Image (cartoon, helix red, strand yellow):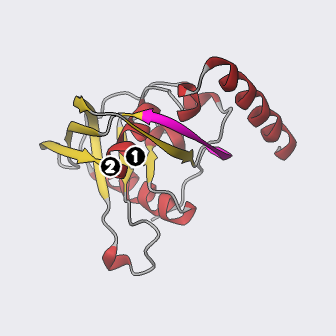
Amino acid sequence: MALLTVHSFPDPVLKQKALPVKEFDEKLAELADNMLETMYEERGIGLAAVQVGVLKQLVVVDLKSGEEDISLREPRVFVNPHIVERSGETISEEGCLSVIEYRAEIKRAESIKLEFQDLQGEPRTMEAEGLLSICIQHELDHLQGILFIDHLPMLKQKMVKKRLAKLAREAA
């Protein structure tokens, strides 16, 4: 396995839309493994392929990412995922491996129904609620070129993006 580079705002790759996965092969499985390894290393709970510069509809999630005992982890891989049902509403604080040093309260659906494919290309359906639902919605936004800060009110969004761009320039 190899660690991948997580792209940070304002990198333009983060605004690009991912393309559907058509080939379910060893390279896809290796990418998913590398994404999981990168997510664990970065202490995240979700990662979209777009965040590592790969424009494929691939997302990995593990709410138990912080577990030192790897037998307790629960890695999930979603290929070509899309939400078919949303219900309820919740507001929670979100952060992002691609938006360093910023967190904000974001409104999302409380629960979702998701259709996706597994690494073998088999169709799957899953329902999620709570933190898992929030995490999946956040990662699926990445596949559409949307960052969680894009959900902020316009004025706040402009201020935050300006500040984050300045921090990125200073760090470069």
The quarter of the picture where residue 75 lies is bottom left
Q: Dot 1 corresponds to which residue?
A: 135
Q: Which residue is at 30% across, 51% downward?
A: 77
Vertical placement of residue 90 versus 38, above or below: above
Percent across and percent down for residue 132 are: 33, 50
Disc 1: CA contacts within 10 A as few (<14), some (14-19) or many (>=20): many
Percent across and percent down for residue 37 are: 46, 63
Q: Nearer the viewer, residue 82 or 163?
A: 163
* Image quarter (top left, top right, bottom left or bottom right) of the N terminus: bottom left
The quarter of the picture where residue 111 lies is top left
Vertical placement of residue 75 versus 160, above or below: below
Q: Which residue is at 63% across, 27% downward?
A: 12
From which residue to which does the magenta span run?
Answer: 99-107
| Left or right relative to 91: residue 14 | right
Find numbered disc 2 in the image and state the secondary structure of the residue it sits on: helix
Q: Which residue is at 53% across, 45% downward?
A: 94
Vertical placement of residue 85 versus 133, above or below: above
On whether residue 147 falls in the magenta region, the answer is no
Label 1 with label 2: CB-CB less than 8 Å: no
What amino acid does circle 2 point to?
Gly
| Left or right relative to 127: residue 110 | right
**Mark linked to residue 130:** 2
On whether residue 104 falls in the magenta region, the answer is yes
Q: Residue furthest right?
A: 170
Percent across and percent down for residue 85 are: 20, 29
